[in-house]
Image: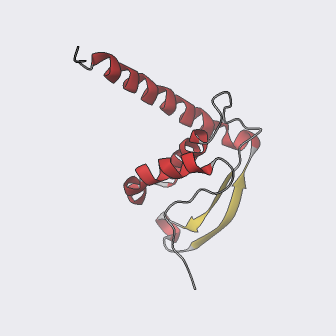
Amino acid sequence: MTQEMAACAIGARSQMARTYLERHLEKFEDCGREELIQHGLRALKESLSQDKELTVDNTSIGIVGVGSGVGKGKVEVFRLYEGLEISGFLESASSEGQQAEAEAEAEGQSMEVDS
């Protein structure tokens, strides 16, 4: 028996991550590897306490799946990224998160409020 999954979150405090994944599920099919990693990091960030951040010390990224490009359709072996290998991913996720917060704040300020 095989089960196909598009997104999953397990473990302590995983409900917030699952909620993020469910809200963005329709976007995943058209995403490349880098975008999927960013979604995974954003989902993980949603599950953190407010005073915590993702760092190279508390985050690892594991990738396995069907290859694209030259080896399209070929199953890739599991690869674990840790430490400085993931610093670029974390920086990208952090800058995108700050941009999204700024946009949400700008929308909130420009919204008309009934009195």
Judge whether 32 appears above or below 75 on screen: above
> Residue 56 lies in what quarter of the image?
top right
- Residue at 55 percent of width and 36 percent of height: 93
> Residue 75 lies in what quarter of the image?
bottom right
Residue 58: give x, y in percent of width and height. 75, 40
Along the line of sight, which residue is nearer the eye, 51 or 70? 51
Along the line of sight, which residue is nearer the eye, 35 or 104? 104
Residue 44: give x, y in percent of width and height. 60, 45
Along the line of sight, which residue is nearer the eye, 94 or 83? 94
- Residue at 34 percent of width and 21 percent of height: 108
Residue 21: give x, y in percent of width and height. 48, 52
Q: Is residue 115 left or right of residue 74?
A: left
- Residue at 66 percent of width and 32 percent of height: 53
Judge whether 101 appears above or below 48 on screen: above
Residue 35 visible in the displayed image: no
Along the line of sight, which residue is nearer the eye, 55 or 106? 106
Residue 29 visible in the displayed image: yes
